[in-house]
Image (spheres, helix red, strand yellow):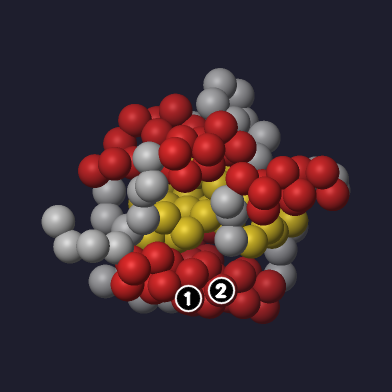
Amino acid sequence: MRHIYIVDDDADVRQSLQLLLATLTDAHIDAFDSGTEFAACAASLDPGVVLLDYYMPGLNGLAVLEQIVAQRLPFSVVMITAHEDVNVAVDALAAGACDFLEKPYEYENLLMVLRIAFANLDRMTADRPEV
């Protein structure tokens, strides 16, 4: 089963994205209301795609992404932001995100980014040695 993790401090965004993804995919979807909450349990989660908000209080999206990469966790990360900022996209991609998505997003863009992220995840997990 595929897994999608939503990490966003905005409850409305989390809920609407969960509902949308439930209709567009057959993936198991979990949501987290902060980067801190996600980071605390990330190592125990199944491999998956992380839709990660960039701007969050406490541990922001870039800090979470850096932890994921440093711990070599099996997540394909898509950084999401409502702010039009090329530097955010550059920083996220340089830190290891597989793609970047701006809010508000169109269904087609979301699906395209998910396809890319899952293909990236498949490559990552195929290269991981069995434990």
Q: Secondary structure at mark 1?
A: helix
Task: Characterize the local packing of mark 1: few (<14), some (14-19) or many (20 or more) Cα atoms within 10 angstroms.
Answer: some
The residue where tag 2 is placed is: 116
Q: Are marks 1 and 2 in contact (CB under 8 Å)?
A: yes
Q: Of residues 97 and 18, which is closer to you in this image?
A: 97
Q: Of residues 119 and 2, which is closer to you in this image?
A: 119
The residue where tag 1 is placed is: 119
Residue 96: percent from left, percent from top: 57, 51
Q: Of residues 24 and 131, which is closer to you in this image?
A: 131
Residue shown at 44%/39% (left/top)? Answer: 70
Furthest toward the top, the residue is 58
Q: Secondary structure at mark 2?
A: helix
Above or below — where is 119 with respect to 39? below
Residue 97: percent from left, percent from top: 59, 54
Residue shown at 23%/62% (left/top)? Answer: 129
Does residue 89 show up?
yes
Q: Quadrant of residue 121?
A: bottom left
Above or below — where is 58 with respect to 40? above
Residue 29: percent from left, percent from top: 37, 59
Quarter of the rendering occupied by the N terminus? bottom left
Taking the image as shown, residue 117 lies to the left or right of residue 81, namely: left
Above or below — where is 130 with respect to 12? below
Taking the image as shown, residue 19 lies to the left or right of residue 83, namely: left
Q: Amino acid at mark 2?
A: Ile
Q: Amino acid at mark 1?
A: Ala
